Image: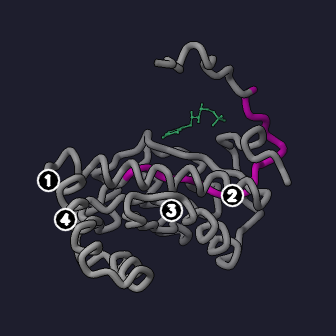
Amino acid sequence: MVDIFENRRSVNFFDKTKDISNDLLKKIIERATLAPSAFNLQPWEIIAVRSEEAKQKLFETSNRQPKILEAPVTLIILGDKEGFSENNSSWKVMYDAFKNEESLKNSQNAAAFLYGSTEERKIKFAESNAGLLAMSIMYAVKEQGLDSHPMSGIDFEGIAKAFDIDSSKSVVMTIAIGYHDDSKEIFPRLKRKSFDEIVKIV
Ligand SMILES: Cc1cc2nc3c(=O)[nH]c(=O)nc-3n(C[C@H](O)[C@H](O)[C@H](O)COP(=O)(O)O)c2cc1C
């Protein structure tokens, strides 16, 4: 298996001649949805930007980052700020698995309090879960021999408007997906902070 941690890079240049099929995109996304989420609520949605018209809209609302026009697909990752609510179909999945009405109700009440009682909690819920999906997508992409590039240097509000995204959803980031243009070099990977710099053992 390829070492997806060592080999994943944010690739700035995509090969415009190499498309990816919807089947491959589906395989990548389905694999990535094995990511964890609170109560398995999976409060996320994805808009796959593929047509020239949609790419142009995303390009204009993403500080005109050229990779959006070069990559065959760019994903808009959305977090659902209302994903804890009872109409989330994942609650039914939980009920069908455990057949326990009381436990379902307790979980729904807990989720409503933990993730829905303030706007800050709603955003945290939506973006933390969708962020894990985003990372999972980038590793799934690498596993399939493709490359990706996450972006948050984008106009979040502009994207929401251009793609008619409901206000209950948060635009978390976008991820361009495709094959690296081998004729162009990307800069060497920069050193990461050390264990000692980031970990405090208490
Ligand atoms: C949430 C997030 C947002 C990013 N936004 C942008 C962006 O808008 N434009 C860009 O060129 N790179 C962006 N990057 C890429 C980072 O610059 C890159 O991940 C970092 O330099 C480390 O390089 P590597 O991913 O190749 O290891 C973003 C990365 C992350 C995780």
Secondary structure of the residue carrying tag 3 is: helix
Work out how far the residue at label 1 is from the one at label 4, CA to CA, in angstroms. Answer: 11 Å
Secondary structure of the residue carrying tag 1 is: loop
* Residue at 19%, 57% in the rendered image: 116
* 93 displayed left or right of 21: left
Work out how far the residue at label 2 is from the one at label 3, CA to CA, in angstroms. Answer: 20 Å
The local crowd at label 3, few if under 14, some if 14 to 19, many if 20 or more residues have their Cα within 10 Å, is many
Secondary structure of the residue carrying tag 2 is: helix
| Residue 65 point in image, percent of width and height | 52, 44
* Quadrant (top left, top right, bottom left, bottom right) of the N terminus: bottom right
| Residue 51 point in image, percent of width and height | 54, 72
In this view, the mark in front (3 or 1): 1
Q: Residue 172 shows which numbered tag?
A: none
Which amino acid, by three-letter code, is at mark 3? Lys
Give the magenta part as a residue range: 172-188
| Position above or below: 11 against 56 | above
| Residue 26 point in image, percent of width and height | 62, 74
* Mark 2 vs 3, N-terminal side: 3
Q: Residue 117 shows which numbered tag?
A: 1
Work out how far the residue at label 4 is from the one at label 3, CA to CA, in angstroms. Answer: 40 Å
- Judging depth in this view, the residue of 92 and 80 nearest the camera is 92
In this view, the mark in front (2 or 3): 2
Which amino acid, by three-letter code, is at mark 2? Val
| Residue 95 point in image, percent of width and height | 36, 81
- Residue labelled with disc 2: 141
* 190 displayed left or right of 202: right
* Mark 2 vs 1, N-terminal side: 1
Which amino acid, by three-letter code, is at mark 4? Asn
- Residue labelled with disc 4: 109
- Judging depth in this view, the residue of 49 and 8 nearest the camera is 8
In this view, the mark in front (2 or 1): 1
